[in-house]
Image (tube, helix red, strand yellow):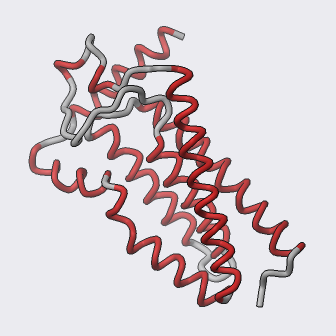
Amino acid sequence: MQELLNLDTELFLFLNGLGTETWDGLWLVITNKLTFIPLYALLLFFIYKHLGLKPMLYLIFLIALMITFTDQITNVFKRGFMRPRPCGAEDIMDQVRFIAPRCGLYGFFSGHASNSMAAAVLGGLLLRPYYKNLIFILIFWSFIVAYSRIYVGVHYPLDIICGMAFGGISGFGFYKLWQFLSVKYQWYS
């Protein structure tokens, strides 16, 4: 296990070290949770356009539930594993390009990675009948958001990989829950 953590640290230092001041502003924008509100609004518009108002309103509730779920499970893992973030790890702190506004205590696993991947999978699957390749675009977007956490110095690659895996499973699970509930309660107008 220690060898895996050492490799994770080495990979983090390599990826984090690729950053330059020229690109710092861009990655700070990408890592900001508010940056993608227009994307979420566009996805809701597409859902409204193809599914109708009633299903969209139910979906907003389901999405809020999914984000709350992924966020809270992330916090349980962070408190359970108590793995310091790279920006707070004393043994490598002087080697980290830390540009995020704050560091936080624990990093395993990434909430940004899990939430963005859950949204990508759920949104992509919901809209797959209308926009066949949208899921691939959303998953690529999620990878960019996840990588931003390494770039700004607050997560190791394993934090990202585990967060994305958990988010993907959560997004798929909430999609299946949507399918079940929408048929059971006939939410389509």
Rendered residue at 56%/54% (across/down): 67
Please identify the quadrant where the C terminus is shown. Answer: bottom right
Q: Nearer the viewer, residue 144 or 80?
A: 80
Above or below, 75 against 43 in this view is: above
Q: Position of residue 22 (x, y in %)?
A: 10, 50
Above or below, 41 against 162 in this view is: below
* Quadrant in the rendering for residue 188: bottom right
Q: Position of residue 132 (x, y in %)?
A: 62, 75
Q: Position of residue 9 (x, y in %)?
A: 36, 20
Drawn side of residue 123 relative to residue 31, left or right: right
* Quadrant in the rendering for residue 174: bottom right
Q: Nearer the viewer, residue 5 or 67?
A: 67
Above or below, 4 against 187 in this view is: above
Rendered residue at 21%/32% (across/down): 17
Q: Position of residue 89 (x, y in %)?
A: 30, 17
Please identify the quadrant where the N terminus is shown. Answer: top right
- In the current view of this chain or complex, which residue is farthest to the right? 184
Total numbered labels placed on residues in the image: 0
Drawn side of residue 52 relative to residue 185, left or right: left
Rendered residue at 44%/51% (across/down): 143
